């Protein structure tokens, strides 16, 4: 099994097939940001609920303004929120504002800049077609219209829509509890003293924490473990007891202290796959124990990030039932040649990109340094350029697939 590598596409297929839809819970709107809707949201009434003015001005009858200038008597002031008390008759006008309800008899709104009011009368200086500047009842949406579909990721805009249809709370998918464990005796937490030159900061724990939040999970940092077999075994067994998903980094390759792969079957974890034909991140493990799952990711920081985005991110999103399972993928144009020595794996090459709003093109610049430990190279507008298996050379000007790892 250890020498059998599976294709990226097959590994992803296995991951998605295992993701079970999580139950739902009801939360207040103020707690709904960045959650995933677990129900359709319908309009509670027509919007607008009645014909309203689209701007500040004067409500008139079109028949009165066919020939201008014309002087009309101002009979009422109708601010937004007031119900008109009169019916507009010939020769009359009402002072009206954006969002004001249109009174009966009124069929046109003249913007304030084309009118001049004096001593209770308004002079209309320009004519407008019948119906101008009026939003009709239900123009935005009708009652019972589905405004937000199940699986929608809630942003501030969706929060506003929920409030507009009189929702005080909404059903959302329960967040999966994601346990994060980092392995390695060389790791030192931020704030602790580096006592040996061989020690390194535990960056992966914090990267994985942020990535989990971004994906929609509830991260639980369970700490780091030394390169100790029994300590690691105990920590993994405890994590699988109360977490829906466990993510580890490090200890999954072929070194003398990489024993996570051997430990997992001992605590009842079934192997779903181990080792994928990808670069970076070849030694990836995915397994399950009952309805609990584990991803054991490589320890190099870039490999950790790429592996998370390739497998863990879509797994969490599928569990949440969101419409958008994957990171955003776009077509880009390669701005310089890209070549590699081996082509036996699908590669996710780090790259910088720019977007040209005029041509609506993403321009992709592969990074010269592609080392799996160079996390600093992934700051800013960095994406992953997909290099298919079997491809050694990509020429400047070619279209490429670009994954935007910093967008939902």
Image (cartoon, rainbow, N blue to C red):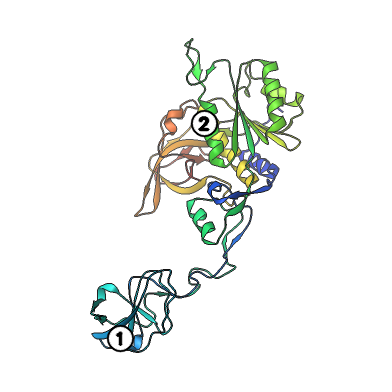
User: In x, y percent, where is residue 354?
Assistant: 38, 44
Q: Quadrant of residue 269?
A: top right
Q: Is residue 361 visible?
A: yes
Q: CA distance from mark 2 to mark 1?
A: 66 Å
Q: How many marks?
A: 2
Residue 339 vs residue 289, the one in the foreground: 289
Q: Horizontal and vertical percent for residue 30? A: 53, 48
Q: Which mark is residue 312?
A: none
Q: Is residue 147 above or below residue 233?
A: below
Q: Residue at x 30, y 88 (%)?
A: 66
Q: Foreground residue, 198 or 56? A: 56
Is residue 343 visible in the rendered structure shown here?
Answer: no
> To which quarter of the image does residue 74 belong?
bottom left
Say which quadrant the N terminus sits in: top right
Around disc 1, counting alpha carbons within 10 Å, would you say few (fewer than 14), some (14 to 19), or many (20 or more)? many
The residue at which mark 1 appears reads as 65
Pointer 2: what residue?
A: 207
Q: Secondary structure at mark 2?
A: helix
Label 2 crowd bin: few (<14), some (14–19), many (20+), radius 10 Å: some
């Amino acid at each position: 099994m250890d020498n059998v590598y599976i294709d990226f596409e097959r590994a992803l297929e296995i991951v998605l097939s295992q993701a079970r839809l999580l139950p739902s819970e009801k939360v207040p709107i103020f707690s709904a940001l960045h959650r995933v809707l677990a129900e359709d949201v319908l309009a509670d009434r027509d919007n607008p609920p009645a014909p309203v003015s689209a701007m500040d001005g004067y409500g008139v009858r079109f028949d009165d303004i066919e020939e201008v200038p014309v002087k009309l008597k101002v009979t009422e002031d109708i601010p937004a929120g007031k119900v008109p008390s009169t019916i507009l008759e010939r020769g009359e006008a009402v002072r009206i504002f954006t969002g004001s309800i249109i009174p009966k008899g009124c069929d046109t709104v003249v913007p304030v800049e084309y009118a001049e009011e004096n001593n209770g009368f308004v002079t209309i200086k320009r004519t407008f077609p019948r119906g101008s500047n009026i939003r009709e009842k239900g123009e935005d949406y009708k009652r019972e219209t589905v405004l937000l579909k199940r699986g929608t990721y809630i942003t501030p805009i969706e929060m506003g829509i929920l409030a507009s249809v009189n929702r005080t709370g909404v059903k959302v998918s329960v967040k999966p509890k994601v346990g994060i464990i980092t392995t390695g005796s060389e790791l030192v937490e931020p704030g602790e003293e580096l006592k040996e030159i061989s020690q390194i900061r535990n960056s992966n724990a914090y990267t994985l924490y942020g990535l989990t939040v971004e994906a929609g999970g509830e991260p639980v940092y369970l700490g780091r473990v030394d390169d100790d077999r029994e300590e690691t075994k105990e920590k993994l067994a405890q994590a699988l007891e109360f977490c829906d998903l466990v993510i580890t980094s490090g200890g999954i390759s072929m070194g003398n202290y990489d024993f996570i792969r051997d430990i997992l079957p001992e605590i009842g974890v079934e192997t779903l796959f181990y080792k994928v034909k990808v670069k970076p991140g070849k030694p990836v493990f995915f397994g399950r124990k009952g309805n609990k799952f584990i991803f054991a990711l490589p320890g190099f920081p870039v490999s950790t990030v790429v592996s998370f985005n390739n497998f863990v991110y879509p797994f969490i999103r599928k569990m949440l039932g969101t419409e958008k399972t994957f990171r955003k993928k776009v077509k880009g144009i390669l701005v310089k040649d890209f070549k590699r020595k081996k082509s036996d794996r699908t590669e996710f090459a780090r790259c910088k990109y720019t977007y040209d709003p005029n041509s609506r093109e993403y321009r992709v610049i592969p990074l010269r340094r592609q080392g799996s430990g160079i996390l600093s190279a992934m700051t800013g507008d960095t994406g992953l350029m997909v290099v298919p298996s079997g491809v050694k050379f990509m020429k400047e000007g070619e279209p490429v697939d670009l994954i935007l790892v910093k967008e939902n």
